[in-house]
Image (cartoon, rainbow, N blue to C red):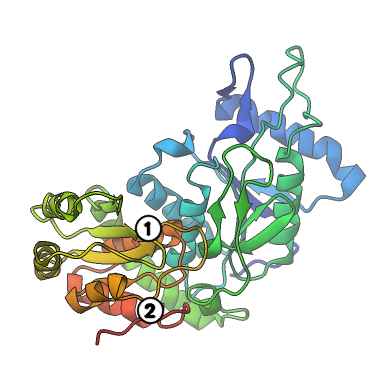
Amino acid sequence: MTKTLSDPIQLIYAGGTFGSYGRPLAPLSAEVFLPTLQKLLADQDNAISLPNISWLDNPLIKDSSQLTPSDFTHFYQLLLTAYAQGDKRFVVITGTDTLSYLGAFLAEAFAGSDICVVVTGSMRPLLDSENLHTYSIDAHSDAWDNLNEALKLAAAGEAGVKISFGGEAWPAQTVQKIHSHDLMAFTGHTRAAYPANSYIKNLPDIRRQHWLDDRQEILSSIQSRAHYARVHALYCLPNDVEVITQQLQALLSQQPCGIILLGFGAGNIPYSKALADTLELAHEKGHMVICASQCPFGGVSDNYAAGSWQYDHHVIAGGRLTIPAIYARLLWLLLRYDTPARRRQRWLNSINQTGTTIKKR
Protein backbone atom coordinates (compact mmCIF):
# COMPACT_ATOMS: atom_id res chain seq x y z
CA MET A 1 0.00 0.00 0.00
CA THR A 2 1.42 3.37 -1.02
CA LYS A 3 1.86 5.79 1.82
CA THR A 4 0.60 9.37 1.77
CA LEU A 5 2.17 12.79 2.19
CA SER A 6 1.23 12.69 5.86
CA ASP A 7 3.67 9.81 6.42
CA PRO A 8 7.21 10.57 7.63
CA ILE A 9 10.06 11.45 5.32
CA GLN A 10 12.70 8.73 5.43
CA LEU A 11 16.13 10.19 6.20
CA ILE A 12 19.38 8.38 5.33
CA TYR A 13 22.66 9.51 6.86
CA ALA A 14 25.68 8.39 4.83
CA GLY A 15 28.50 10.42 6.38
CA GLY A 16 30.58 13.31 5.08
CA THR A 17 31.43 16.75 6.44
CA PHE A 18 27.86 17.14 7.70
CA GLY A 19 28.49 14.77 10.63
CA SER A 20 32.12 15.63 11.37
CA TYR A 21 33.14 16.99 14.76
CA GLY A 22 36.09 17.65 17.05
CA ARG A 23 39.73 18.72 16.72
CA PRO A 24 40.86 17.62 14.22
CA LEU A 25 37.55 17.14 12.42
CA ALA A 26 36.52 13.51 12.04
CA PRO A 27 33.15 11.89 11.25
CA LEU A 28 31.10 10.89 14.27
CA SER A 29 29.84 7.32 14.29
CA ALA A 30 26.19 6.77 13.46
CA GLU A 31 25.61 5.60 17.03
CA VAL A 32 26.64 9.04 18.29
CA PHE A 33 25.61 11.35 15.48
CA LEU A 34 22.09 10.12 14.70
CA PRO A 35 20.70 10.40 18.25
CA THR A 36 22.29 13.87 18.42
CA LEU A 37 20.69 14.90 15.13
CA GLN A 38 17.34 13.47 16.19
CA LYS A 39 17.44 15.48 19.41
CA LEU A 40 18.37 18.67 17.58
CA LEU A 41 15.54 18.15 15.11
CA ALA A 42 13.08 17.50 17.94
CA ASP A 43 14.23 20.66 19.74
CA GLN A 44 13.76 22.72 16.59
CA ASP A 45 10.49 21.13 15.50
CA ASN A 46 8.18 23.42 17.42
CA ALA A 47 10.04 26.53 16.32
CA ILE A 48 10.09 25.95 12.55
CA SER A 49 7.44 23.27 11.96
CA LEU A 50 9.57 20.53 10.42
CA PRO A 51 7.86 17.65 8.59
CA ASN A 52 7.66 14.27 10.30
CA ILE A 53 10.92 12.35 9.93
CA SER A 54 11.78 8.69 10.21
CA TRP A 55 15.19 7.04 9.83
CA LEU A 56 16.38 4.30 7.53
CA ASP A 57 19.05 2.10 9.07
CA ASN A 58 22.20 2.51 7.00
CA PRO A 59 25.37 0.64 8.01
CA LEU A 60 27.43 2.22 5.20
CA ILE A 61 28.82 5.49 6.55
CA LYS A 62 32.11 6.62 5.04
CA ASP A 63 33.89 9.57 3.51
CA SER A 64 32.25 10.16 0.15
CA SER A 65 35.62 10.23 -1.63
CA GLN A 66 35.83 6.51 -0.80
CA LEU A 67 32.51 5.52 -2.39
CA THR A 68 32.60 2.78 -5.04
CA PRO A 69 30.08 1.32 -7.52
CA SER A 70 29.18 -1.29 -4.90
CA ASP A 71 28.43 1.52 -2.44
CA PHE A 72 26.23 3.29 -4.97
CA THR A 73 24.38 0.00 -5.43
CA HIS A 74 23.98 -0.28 -1.66
CA PHE A 75 22.10 3.03 -1.52
CA TYR A 76 20.02 2.03 -4.53
CA GLN A 77 19.03 -1.22 -2.77
CA LEU A 78 18.29 0.61 0.49
CA LEU A 79 15.96 3.06 -1.25
CA LEU A 80 14.44 0.36 -3.46
CA THR A 81 13.50 -1.76 -0.42
CA ALA A 82 11.84 1.18 1.33
CA TYR A 83 10.08 2.24 -1.88
CA ALA A 84 8.72 -1.30 -2.28
CA GLN A 85 7.29 -1.00 1.23
CA GLY A 86 5.35 2.12 0.26
CA ASP A 87 7.69 4.93 1.23
CA LYS A 88 8.09 7.59 -1.46
CA ARG A 89 9.89 10.57 0.10
CA PHE A 90 13.55 10.45 1.10
CA VAL A 91 16.41 12.74 2.09
CA VAL A 92 19.98 11.46 1.73
CA ILE A 93 22.81 13.22 3.60
CA THR A 94 26.22 12.49 2.09
CA GLY A 95 29.63 14.05 1.56
CA THR A 96 30.16 16.67 -1.12
CA ASP A 97 33.07 14.99 -2.96
CA THR A 98 30.80 12.55 -4.80
CA LEU A 99 27.40 14.06 -3.96
CA SER A 100 26.68 14.94 -7.60
CA TYR A 101 27.78 11.46 -8.75
CA LEU A 102 25.52 9.66 -6.27
CA GLY A 103 22.59 11.94 -7.06
CA ALA A 104 22.95 11.40 -10.81
CA PHE A 105 23.26 7.64 -10.33
CA LEU A 106 20.06 7.48 -8.26
CA ALA A 107 18.31 9.58 -10.91
CA GLU A 108 19.24 7.03 -13.57
CA ALA A 109 18.39 4.04 -11.37
CA PHE A 110 14.91 5.21 -10.37
CA ALA A 111 13.82 6.61 -13.74
CA GLY A 112 10.27 5.57 -14.54
CA SER A 113 9.11 5.56 -10.92
CA ASP A 114 7.35 8.13 -8.74
CA ILE A 115 9.92 8.16 -5.93
CA CYS A 116 11.02 11.51 -4.44
CA VAL A 117 14.68 11.62 -3.37
CA VAL A 118 16.52 14.76 -2.24
CA VAL A 119 20.30 14.55 -1.80
CA THR A 120 22.12 17.12 0.34
CA GLY A 121 25.22 17.66 2.45
CA SER A 122 27.26 20.56 3.72
CA MET A 123 30.59 22.31 3.33
CA ARG A 124 30.89 22.83 7.08
CA PRO A 125 29.93 20.43 9.90
CA LEU A 126 26.55 20.74 11.57
CA LEU A 127 28.01 20.65 15.08
CA ASP A 128 30.09 23.40 16.65
CA SER A 129 33.57 22.05 17.42
CA GLU A 130 34.34 25.15 19.51
CA ASN A 131 31.97 23.67 22.06
CA LEU A 132 33.38 20.30 23.10
CA HIS A 133 31.17 19.91 26.17
CA THR A 134 27.82 19.56 24.44
CA TYR A 135 26.60 19.03 20.90
CA SER A 136 25.16 22.24 19.49
CA ILE A 137 24.49 23.59 16.00
CA ASP A 138 27.27 25.71 14.51
CA ALA A 139 25.58 28.99 13.60
CA HIS A 140 28.17 29.56 10.85
CA SER A 141 27.58 26.21 9.18
CA ASP A 142 25.48 25.64 6.08
CA ALA A 143 24.43 22.17 7.28
CA TRP A 144 21.27 23.05 9.18
CA ASP A 145 19.86 25.26 6.41
CA ASN A 146 20.70 22.66 3.75
CA LEU A 147 18.94 19.93 5.73
CA ASN A 148 15.85 22.04 6.32
CA GLU A 149 15.59 23.00 2.65
CA ALA A 150 15.98 19.34 1.65
CA LEU A 151 13.26 18.26 4.10
CA LYS A 152 10.87 20.91 2.78
CA LEU A 153 11.54 19.81 -0.79
CA ALA A 154 10.97 16.17 0.12
CA ALA A 155 7.79 17.10 1.99
CA ALA A 156 6.31 18.39 -1.27
CA GLY A 157 6.78 14.89 -2.66
CA GLU A 158 7.46 15.79 -6.30
CA ALA A 159 8.68 12.70 -8.15
CA GLY A 160 12.32 12.65 -9.16
CA VAL A 161 15.82 12.87 -7.73
CA LYS A 162 17.03 16.35 -6.84
CA ILE A 163 20.06 17.88 -5.18
CA SER A 164 19.40 20.65 -2.66
CA PHE A 165 22.33 22.82 -1.63
CA GLY A 166 22.96 26.45 -0.72
CA GLY A 167 19.31 27.44 -0.91
CA GLU A 168 18.81 26.07 -4.42
CA ALA A 169 17.69 22.76 -5.88
CA TRP A 170 18.18 21.16 -9.28
CA PRO A 171 17.50 17.85 -11.07
CA ALA A 172 20.33 15.62 -9.92
CA GLN A 173 21.87 14.86 -13.31
CA THR A 174 22.46 18.59 -14.02
CA VAL A 175 24.52 19.28 -10.89
CA GLN A 176 28.26 19.66 -10.52
CA LYS A 177 30.59 20.89 -7.80
CA ILE A 178 32.21 24.16 -8.85
CA HIS A 179 34.02 25.27 -5.69
CA SER A 180 36.18 23.26 -3.31
CA HIS A 181 35.29 25.11 -0.10
CA ASP A 182 32.78 27.93 -0.68
CA LEU A 183 29.31 27.40 0.79
CA MET A 184 27.83 27.90 -2.69
CA ALA A 185 29.76 24.87 -3.88
CA PHE A 186 27.29 23.43 -6.41
CA THR A 187 25.38 24.58 -9.41
CA GLY A 188 22.90 23.02 -11.81
CA HIS A 189 20.01 23.96 -14.04
CA THR A 190 16.33 23.17 -14.42
CA ARG A 191 16.28 22.49 -18.18
CA ALA A 192 16.73 18.79 -17.62
CA ALA A 193 15.46 16.05 -19.91
CA TYR A 194 16.01 12.32 -19.34
CA PRO A 195 15.90 10.97 -16.69
CA ALA A 196 14.15 13.90 -15.00
CA ASN A 197 11.29 13.88 -17.49
CA SER A 198 10.74 10.14 -17.07
CA TYR A 199 9.42 10.35 -13.51
CA ILE A 200 5.69 9.82 -13.16
CA LYS A 201 3.72 12.26 -11.01
CA ASN A 202 0.73 9.97 -10.55
CA LEU A 203 1.93 6.41 -11.11
CA PRO A 204 -0.89 3.84 -10.99
CA ASP A 205 -0.35 1.05 -8.47
CA ILE A 206 -0.22 -1.61 -11.19
CA ARG A 207 2.51 0.21 -13.13
CA ARG A 208 4.47 0.84 -9.94
CA GLN A 209 4.31 -2.84 -9.08
CA HIS A 210 5.49 -3.79 -12.57
CA TRP A 211 8.40 -1.37 -12.20
CA LEU A 212 9.26 -2.85 -8.80
CA ASP A 213 8.97 -6.43 -10.02
CA ASP A 214 11.39 -5.67 -12.85
CA ARG A 215 13.95 -4.01 -10.56
CA GLN A 216 13.75 -6.63 -7.83
CA GLU A 217 14.17 -9.41 -10.38
CA ILE A 218 17.53 -8.01 -11.53
CA LEU A 219 18.75 -6.66 -8.18
CA SER A 220 21.10 -9.58 -7.48
CA SER A 221 22.74 -9.27 -10.91
CA ILE A 222 23.16 -5.51 -10.41
CA GLN A 223 24.84 -6.10 -7.07
CA SER A 224 27.11 -8.74 -8.60
CA ARG A 225 28.16 -6.58 -11.57
CA ALA A 226 28.95 -3.67 -9.23
CA HIS A 227 32.01 -5.55 -7.99
CA TYR A 228 33.72 -5.35 -11.38
CA ALA A 229 32.00 -2.47 -13.20
CA ARG A 230 34.53 0.18 -14.19
CA VAL A 231 34.29 3.68 -15.63
CA HIS A 232 37.56 5.33 -16.69
CA ALA A 233 38.35 8.93 -17.59
CA LEU A 234 41.07 9.92 -20.07
CA TYR A 235 41.98 13.60 -19.83
CA CYS A 236 43.34 15.26 -22.94
CA LEU A 237 46.40 17.43 -22.36
CA PRO A 238 48.72 19.20 -24.83
CA ASN A 239 50.73 16.02 -25.33
CA ASP A 240 51.64 14.00 -28.38
CA VAL A 241 48.52 12.09 -29.43
CA GLU A 242 50.45 8.88 -28.75
CA VAL A 243 49.97 9.49 -25.01
CA ILE A 244 46.18 9.24 -25.01
CA THR A 245 46.32 6.44 -27.59
CA GLN A 246 48.47 4.38 -25.24
CA GLN A 247 46.17 5.17 -22.31
CA LEU A 248 43.20 3.92 -24.31
CA GLN A 249 45.05 0.83 -25.53
CA ALA A 250 45.86 -0.08 -21.93
CA LEU A 251 42.11 -0.44 -21.23
CA LEU A 252 41.30 -2.70 -24.17
CA SER A 253 42.31 -5.91 -22.43
CA GLN A 254 39.74 -5.34 -19.68
CA GLN A 255 36.17 -6.59 -19.83
CA PRO A 256 33.77 -4.08 -21.42
CA CYS A 257 33.80 -0.84 -19.46
CA GLY A 258 32.83 2.82 -19.73
CA ILE A 259 35.42 5.33 -20.94
CA ILE A 260 35.05 9.10 -20.78
CA LEU A 261 37.24 11.10 -23.17
CA LEU A 262 37.64 14.58 -21.67
CA GLY A 263 38.33 16.68 -24.73
CA PHE A 264 39.27 20.31 -25.18
CA GLY A 265 36.57 22.93 -25.66
CA ALA A 266 33.56 21.49 -27.46
CA GLY A 267 35.04 17.99 -27.34
CA ASN A 268 38.09 18.37 -29.55
CA ILE A 269 40.43 15.35 -29.49
CA PRO A 270 43.87 15.23 -31.19
CA TYR A 271 43.70 13.00 -34.26
CA SER A 272 45.95 10.19 -35.39
CA LYS A 273 45.23 7.07 -37.40
CA ALA A 274 46.49 5.00 -34.49
CA LEU A 275 43.96 6.62 -32.13
CA ALA A 276 41.15 6.19 -34.67
CA ASP A 277 42.05 2.51 -35.07
CA THR A 278 42.16 2.10 -31.27
CA LEU A 279 38.67 3.62 -30.95
CA GLU A 280 37.42 1.12 -33.54
CA LEU A 281 38.98 -1.72 -31.57
CA ALA A 282 37.49 -0.42 -28.31
CA HIS A 283 34.04 -0.60 -29.89
CA GLU A 284 34.66 -4.13 -31.21
CA LYS A 285 35.60 -5.24 -27.69
CA GLY A 286 32.38 -3.82 -26.20
CA HIS A 287 33.68 -0.68 -24.50
CA MET A 288 31.51 2.44 -24.49
CA VAL A 289 33.50 5.61 -25.21
CA ILE A 290 31.79 8.91 -24.43
CA CYS A 291 33.23 12.31 -25.31
CA ALA A 292 32.82 15.10 -22.75
CA SER A 293 34.21 18.60 -22.45
CA GLN A 294 36.73 19.74 -19.88
CA CYS A 295 34.71 22.96 -19.70
CA PRO A 296 32.16 23.05 -16.85
CA PHE A 297 29.43 24.43 -19.13
CA GLY A 298 28.33 24.08 -22.74
CA GLY A 299 29.06 20.43 -23.47
CA VAL A 300 30.29 19.07 -26.80
CA SER A 301 29.40 19.62 -30.45
CA ASP A 302 30.61 18.57 -33.89
CA ASN A 303 31.18 22.11 -35.18
CA TYR A 304 34.93 21.63 -35.36
CA ALA A 305 36.77 19.09 -37.49
CA ALA A 306 39.14 18.70 -34.54
CA GLY A 307 36.34 16.98 -32.63
CA SER A 308 33.90 15.65 -35.19
CA TRP A 309 36.24 12.96 -36.56
CA GLN A 310 35.86 10.75 -33.47
CA TYR A 311 32.12 10.24 -34.01
CA ASP A 312 32.94 8.26 -37.15
CA HIS A 313 34.71 5.74 -34.90
CA HIS A 314 31.85 4.85 -32.53
CA VAL A 315 32.50 7.53 -29.91
CA ILE A 316 29.22 8.79 -28.41
CA ALA A 317 28.80 12.50 -27.72
CA GLY A 318 28.00 13.38 -24.12
CA GLY A 319 25.90 16.34 -25.23
CA ARG A 320 25.45 18.83 -22.40
CA LEU A 321 25.65 16.19 -19.68
CA THR A 322 28.00 16.90 -16.78
CA ILE A 323 30.90 14.57 -16.05
CA PRO A 324 29.11 13.18 -12.94
CA ALA A 325 26.01 12.55 -15.07
CA ILE A 326 28.04 10.76 -17.77
CA TYR A 327 29.74 8.63 -15.12
CA ALA A 328 26.38 7.82 -13.52
CA ARG A 329 24.74 6.84 -16.81
CA LEU A 330 27.67 4.67 -17.86
CA LEU A 331 27.72 2.94 -14.48
CA TRP A 332 23.98 2.30 -14.49
CA LEU A 333 24.12 0.85 -18.01
CA LEU A 334 27.00 -1.43 -17.01
CA LEU A 335 24.97 -2.66 -14.04
CA ARG A 336 21.54 -2.80 -15.66
CA TYR A 337 22.20 -4.37 -19.07
CA ASP A 338 24.13 -7.53 -19.84
CA THR A 339 25.50 -6.81 -23.32
CA PRO A 340 27.43 -3.92 -24.91
CA ALA A 341 24.82 -3.67 -27.67
CA ARG A 342 21.95 -3.15 -25.22
CA ARG A 343 23.94 -0.57 -23.26
CA ARG A 344 24.78 1.40 -26.37
CA GLN A 345 21.21 1.25 -27.65
CA ARG A 346 19.87 2.50 -24.32
CA TRP A 347 22.36 5.38 -24.23
CA LEU A 348 21.49 6.47 -27.74
CA ASN A 349 17.76 6.27 -26.99
CA SER A 350 18.15 8.46 -23.91
CA ILE A 351 20.74 10.98 -25.10
CA ASN A 352 18.40 12.10 -27.86
CA GLN A 353 16.29 13.60 -25.06
CA THR A 354 19.11 15.45 -23.28
CA GLY A 355 19.94 18.21 -25.71
CA THR A 356 22.78 18.18 -28.20
CA THR A 357 22.66 15.09 -30.39
CA ILE A 358 25.52 14.26 -32.72
CA LYS A 359 24.77 11.69 -35.35
CA LYS A 360 27.28 9.50 -37.10
CA ARG A 361 27.85 10.94 -40.56
Labels 2 & 1 near each other (Cβ < 8 A): no
Instruction: Answer above or below: position of 357 versus 90.
Output: below
Mark 2 lies on residue: 303
Q: In the shown orientation, is residue 270 left or right of residue 188? A: left
Mark earlier in primary sequence (2, 1): 2
Specify the quadrant that holds the N terminus: bottom right
- Identity, as a three-letter code, of the amino acid under mark 1: Tyr
Distance from label 2 to label 1 (Cα)? 24 Å
The residue lying at 42 percent from left, 78 percent from top is: 210
Residue placed most toward the observer, 339 or 101: 101
Q: In the shown orientation, is residue 57 left or right of residue 36? A: left
Q: Position of residue 21 (x, y in %)?
A: 64, 22
Residue placed most toward the observer, 257 or 201: 257
Q: Position of residue 78 (x, y in %)?
A: 47, 51
Would residue 326 be seen by someone viewing this image from the given angle?
Answer: yes
Q: In the shown orientation, is residue 290 left or right of residue 247? A: right
Q: Secondary structure at mark 1?
A: helix
Q: Position of residue 115 (x, y in %)?
A: 57, 67
**Neighbour tally class for label 1: few under 14, some 14-19, many 20 plus, Cα within 10 Å:** many
Total labels drawn: 2
- Identity, as a three-letter code, of the amino acid under mark 2: Asn
Which label number is shown at residue 327? 1
Based on the displayed image, in which of its 4 quarters is residue 221 positioned?
Answer: bottom left
The residue lying at 62 percent from left, 81 percent from top is: 202
**Neighbour tally class for label 2: few under 14, some 14-19, many 20 plus, Cα within 10 Å:** few
